[in-house]
Amino acid sequence: MEIRIGLRNTAREIAFESKQSAAEVEASVEKSLNSETKTLKLVDDKGRIFIVPTDALAYVEIGAEEARRVGFIA
């Protein structure tokens, strides 16, 4: 699934694919925002770790878990 993270005061966003489910990502974001850790930690499908300070978060967009279709639609 695709995850996009928008950051305050910057025009760029962080975008990556993850093997985590939408519920897992949502729970991680909520936990980070409601706790005192002050960071959001997510892992992409290649094993890279993204650590973002929660005070810099503008938004987190979680893509659909549906597999991409291949081919033409009639």
Image (spheres, helix red, strand yellow):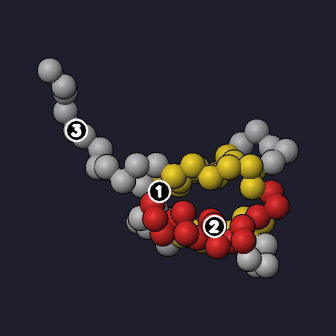
Judge whether 16 appears above or below 45 on screen. above
Residue 30, disc: 2
Q: What element carries label 2?
A: helix
Q: Separation of disc 3 and disc 2 at Cα?
A: 34 Å
Decide: few, some or many residues near mark 1? Use Cα within 10 Å; few <14, some 14-19, many ≥20.
some
Q: Residue furthest left?
A: 74
On the image, the x and y values in percent for residue 25 come to 52, 65
Q: Which of marks 1 and 3 is nearer the N terminus?
A: 1
Instruction: Determine which quarter of the picture holds residue 20.
Output: bottom left
Instruction: Give the residue pinned by disc 1.
Output: 17
Decide: few, some or many residues near mark 3? Use Cα within 10 Å; few <14, some 14-19, many ≥20.
few
Amino acid found under the numbered disc labelled 2: Glu
Q: What element carries label 1?
A: strand
Q: What element carries label 3?
A: loop
Decide: few, some or many residues near mark 2? Use Cα within 10 Å; few <14, some 14-19, many ≥20.
few
Taking the spot 72% from the left edge, 71% from the top edge, the residue there is 34
Taking the spot 36% from the left edge, 53% from the top edge, the residue there is 65
Amino acid found under the numbered disc labelled 3: Val
| Left or right, residue 20 beside residue 12 | left
Q: Residue furthest bottom?
A: 36
